[in-house]
Image (cartoon, rainbow, N blue to C red):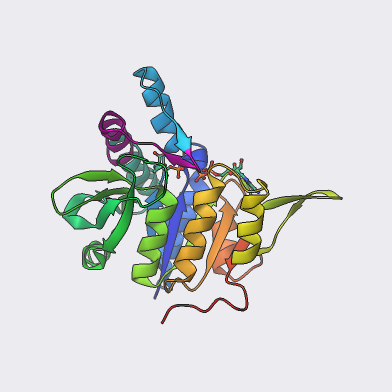
Amino acid sequence: MKYLIIKCGGSVFERLPESFYKSIVELNAGGKWQPVLVHGGGPLISSMLKKLEIPTEFVNGLRVTSSQVMEVVEMVLSGSVNKQAVGRLMKAGGSAYGVSGADGRLLLAKASQEAGGLGLVGEVVEVNTKLIEAIVKTGNIPVISPVGVDENGQRYNVNGDTAASAIAGALKGRLCFISDISGIYTEGNTGKRKLSSLTKEDAETLIEQKIITGGMIPKVKAAIDGLMHKVPETVILNGLEENSLLDFCEGKEIGTKIILGGEVKQHA
Ligand SMILES: Nc1ncnc2c1ncn2[C@@H]1O[C@H](COP(=O)(O)OP(=O)(O)O)[C@@H](O)[C@H]1O
Ligand SMILES: CC(=O)N[C@@H](CCC(=O)OP(=O)(O)O)C(=O)O
């Protein structure tokens, strides 16, 4: 049984077809894969902040998080989105257990070291894999919201891609980023071109050239970080493409695979 960490982006969450959730349920029933769902919800957080007239700002794809913003982040991610995802898996015939990363220290976190002062943005220090394994033992698909917590109970806003990568590393599982785009695109002489794979060096260059921008920056950084911490395989897939997840699990070439370049060694 191999762990498959499926990160559903907020960009696509509300538009994912029922067949997508059925794929997850099918994989779970098949016995070869153990899916673990991690979700984002960035656009839903932004629209709730707008309704509440709280301004919001991103730096390199990460939301600057004051304590007022954090309250809304937690409400949207651990309340609304998490329970919607559980409901959709149930509707697809599965059984799911939704949990916030703050519950049971699932995602032990600390303030992010990213420069620029992002407030309560967190990075994951440790993943409570025992808790995930316990949920799996009950026959449920774990559904995790990317909220972290420190030893004092302070909650942090962890980017969904970062959280998924840390969870995949801890479980040594494969990682699929489900987004609204079929992979990473570059701008060339012949127009837009989709990359079938991307190395760490390519990623650094494309970020510098501003070809990889916005929410794709934390996704690519998280993918590389995961590969350096025991994640065997990472891919970006379009959740709106029929059977994209099943095709990946069957070993078909799909989406953009993130790989480490030749000279970069995986950590022991
Ligand atoms: N080079 C690139 N190739 C593909 N998408 C990119 C690129 N640079 C930026 N993006 C943007 O990244 C978006 C996906 O990131 P994001 O909206 O944060 O997704 P999610 O909510 O799924 O995590 C795409 O919809 C696209 O607009
Ligand atoms: C620190 C940070 O940026 N956190 C994200 C958490 C949600 C998320 O990651 O959502 P997507 O997967 O839809 O981008 C945010 O506040 O939007």
Residue 201 location (% of width, % of height): 63, 65
81 versus 204 height, above or below: above
Q: Can I make out residue 81 in this image? A: yes
The picture places residue 35, in percent across and down from the top left corner, at 40, 62
Q: Main secondary structure of the magenta part?
A: helix
Residue furthest out toward the left: 152
Q: Does the stretch in magenta take in 60?
A: yes
State the residue lying farthest toward the right. Answer: 190
Q: How many marks?
A: 0
Quarter-wise, where is residue 267 in the image? bottom left
Q: Is residue 33 left or right of residue 187?
A: left
Give the residue at the far bottom of this rendering: 268
Which residue is drawn at the image coordinates 73% and 51% (left, top)? 186
Residue at 27% x, 34% y is: 75
Left or right: where 89 falls relative to 232: left
Is 200 included in the stretch rendered in magenta? no
Instruction: Place residue 259 in its image quadrant.
Output: bottom right
Does residue 98 appear in the picture of this structure? Answer: no
Q: Nearer the viewer, residue 16 or 216?
A: 216
> Residue 181's x, y, as percent?
62, 46
In what quadrant of the picture does the C terminus appear? bottom left
Q: Residue 136: x and y, percent? A: 27, 64
Taking depth in this image into account, of 268 and 180 the one nearest to the observer is 268
Give the quadrant of ligand 2.
top left
Q: In which quadrant of the rendered image does the N terminus lie?
A: bottom left
- Which region is colored magenta? 59-78
The residue lying at 37 percent from left, 40 percent from top is 118
